[in-house]
Image: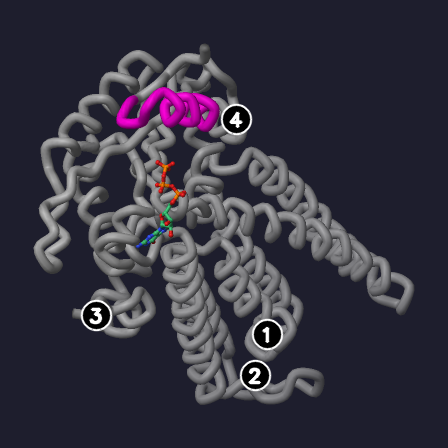
Amino acid sequence: MLRPDAGEVMESRSAREILAAVLARPDEVMLEVGAGGELLVARLRVVIAALLLVLPLANAVSGGTVRETLIGLGGAVFVNVFAQVWLQLARRRRRYRWLSFATVAFDVTATTAVLIVLAFAHLPAALNSMVVWGCYLLAIVLTALRGDGRTTLFAGALAVLQYGAIIAAVFAFADSPEHLLSSDYGAVTPGPQVQRVMLLVIATMITATVVYRMQRLVEMSGTDGLTRLPNRTWLLHRMPRLLEVASEEDGSLSLALIDLDHFSRINDEAGHHAGDRAIRHVVEVLKGMTERNERLVRLGGEEFVLVMPQPLGTAWERVDAIRRVLGQRPFDPERGNLEPLRLTFSAGVAASPHDGHDLSTLLRRADRRLKMAKREGRNRVIARDG
Ligand SMILES: Nc1nc2c(ncn2[C@@H]2O[C@H](COP(=O)(O)OP(=O)(O)OP(=O)(O)O)[C@@H](O)[C@H]2O)c(=O)[nH]1
């Protein structure tokens, strides 16, 4: 039977499942991607804030009142100070879980604050200034870079609530219809305001869909198609953070490079399809033996990595126990009169901080030990050089 590929699984999700995915905390790889997005948004905010400083000066030069210029300048300085604070916090990637919610609240509320200031100067400006209102849309759309559907829905809900409150307040404060007429901004009427609120809702839905799609693509790019295990991309994205956490907690992190022995023989004798099934059989056994805090990754071909939050000695014992269990569970090729085949693997283990502090050093060490295990006759696990 053909397995549906990841793309088909993605398409067949119900609306409720999609909503649940958008509301869920993103996976670790997506959080890493989102932290990069937060930093990008923070840098963009610094540039926009710096441009805002020019506006009050332009107002002064073009004959604006001193009061207007000072209010504008005060607002621009306020936004610049916060933009710098958000940038410094975003540089400490993923240190603060609340950061993206705080920055989203800031972006939306800063827009609302400007509309309120405009309302005090000229009531219709609060509801008919397209440029400032457009900042709500920007705040919502930019949440796509954070890759977290929860911040998108938060931005949308906050924008709708705050703008809805401004609409209610403006209509409540306008004593007569003339108060809602402006030569610069036109007439303020309820119809277009409802449309604007609808546009905010639509922008939120579109952005949430983009986030959902991005999350699924990242998930697919980090998943191996044959075994559904995390793949090399996942390892490259995730390991630096896992190593960082282990070092912060003064713990060890071990990595076992596992390579099936004489696997080409299975392909030669039983065929490529049986080879695929043999790989899935091995993965089933390995997955059955791994614990909740361990991660099994398919690096490529018949090569796997097992990541364990254990020191070197314990990790060696774990992998050797898995090796013995695999030896007791032969693979049935279900073809002709071929007997069940006993599959074995060789493995090299390396650990942080014992053997190194980064992924490439650990992989190099583990590979050296794996090669030694192959040379010494296969079906063994080696955790030390020489
Ligand atoms: N069926 C199948 N075969 C694969 C897959 N990926 C890699 N292989 C095969 O795995 C075999 C790996 O062969 P080698 O790297 O020479 O090593 P080996 O035969 O396992 O021998 P040693 O590693 O030296 O013990 C090749 O025949 C590949 O075609 C896969 O996804 N499916």
Q: Is residue 195 left or right of residue 281?
A: right
Q: Secondary structure at mark 1?
A: helix
Q: Is residue 378 magenta?
A: yes
* Residue shown at the point (68%, 52%) measured from the top left: 75
Mark 3 vs 1, N-terminal side:
3
The residue pinned by badge 2 equals 180
Q: Looking at the picture, tell me which residue is in the foreground, 191 or 311.
A: 311
Above or below residue 145? Residue 281 is above
Q: Mark number for residue 2? A: 3
Residue 305 horizontal/vertical position (percent):
36, 35
Residue annotated with mark 4 = 358
Residue corresponding to mark 1: 123
Kindly tell me whether mark 1's CB lies below 8 Å from ligand 1: no
316 is higher (above) or lower (below) than 174: above
- In this rendering, the label closer to the viewer, 2 or 4: 4
> How packed is label 2: few (under 14 Cα within 10 Å), some, or many (20 or more)?
many
Q: CA distance from mark 1 to mark 4?
A: 59 Å
User: Crowdedness of circle 1 by 10 Å Cα count: few (<14), some, many (20+)?
Assistant: many
For residue 159, what is the image quadrant? bottom left
The quadrant the C terminus occupies is top left
- Cβ atoms at labels 2 and 1 below 8 Å apart: yes
Quick one: SS at disc 2? helix
Q: Give how far apart the Cα atoms at labels 2 and 4 are.
A: 64 Å
